[in-house]
Image (tube, rainbow, N blue to C red):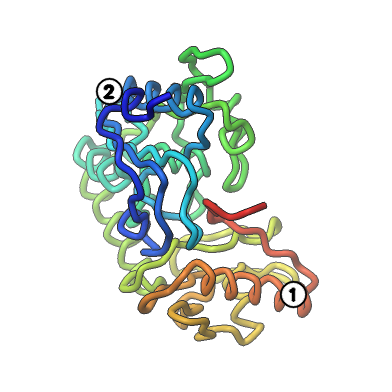
Amino acid sequence: MNIEKELPGIKKNISLVQYTTFKIGGKAKYFCTVGTKEELIEAVKAAKKMRLPFFILGKGSNLLVSDKGFNGIVIKIVNCKLKVENRKISADAGVPLNKLVSLSAEKSLTDMEWAVGIPGTVGGAVYGNAGSFGKSMKDVVDKVEVYDIKTRKVKIVSNKDCKFAYRESIFKKNKNLIILSTKLSLIRGEKKEIKNKIKEYLKYKKGTQPLNYPSAGSVFKNPKNFSAGEPGEENKFSSSNFTAAQLIEKCGLKGERAGGAKISEKHANFIVNFGGATAKDAKKLINLAKKSVKRKFGIVLKEEIQHIGFEN
């Protein structure tokens, strides 16, 4: 079979460094860009027909790509259709979250302010049930349109059937379901209040996160018994109720380096690329944090970021 015939315009040996917020990663054997839901389905069908592994790439956040790259097809989604009807917003999987936040504010719709500054797409946010400031996608998703690889049909998944949990969803567990679009249900609000909250959240993130360096965002999930509060609210926790960042910091790992990667002094749950970092460097720090926290607290940190191209 001819891959170029199956997917006209497909590229070979494309570096993924430029396509990830971490600015880390080897080459994709094959790389294609899709601008519509129909093109996304066709690309997935072609990958299955060619018996090639595939990965759907949004903004490349929350992602660590192996230095060896990805021996399959990377499908880059840029489908960005957005439609507003009363309090409902329909958004393609490739819509950037910040674009969704801005549109919601302009239409005086509240409940998406928490997503400001998250450099991901709607599809990625639904897939990982992204969240911040005590809110997440499960609070706003009405239903999700998916392509089912097994049945080769497009179907609708309700919020309940998405099985949302902390940074989890049915889409993480069932790789046969490819997110095409989602419909969100928001609440009417005051435009000025919504925009003020967006400014407040963005200011908080800029003050507490190392946004001036490439990173993959939060590396680890917070322990199960931790509940996040609003910005400025003091966290009330027992000795076993720390955030992942606090656990790593208490192990004295802030500023720890490996090659061009570093555990941020500003936020210990961020590993930053301060110049020429490799996936090997990042993995070294991830493993160091996990071992140190397990040894000191008996807590096993679970990664929030996805790993692509690594051998299991």
Residue under the point 28% across and 26% down: 36
Q: Could you say which disc has been placed on residue 47 in the image?
A: none
What residue is shown with label 2? 86
Look at the image and tell me whether residue 89 can be seen: no
Q: Residues within 10 Å of mark 1 (few under 14, many from 20)?
A: few
Q: From what the image shows, is residue 39 above or below residue 297?
A: above
Callout 1 secondary element: loop
Residue under the point 66% across and 70% down: 242
- The one nearer the camera, 73 or 272, is 73
Q: Position of residue 234 (x, y in %)?
A: 54, 71
Look at the image and tell me whether residue 220 can be seen: yes
Q: Is residue 53 left or right of residue 17?
A: right
Q: Position of residue 282 (x, y in %)?
A: 52, 71
Residue type highlighted by circle 2 = Asn
- The one nearer the camera, 171 or 116, is 171
What residue is shown with label 1? 239
**In which quarter of the view is residue 9 placed?**
top left
Mark 1 vs mark 2: which is more N-terminal? 2
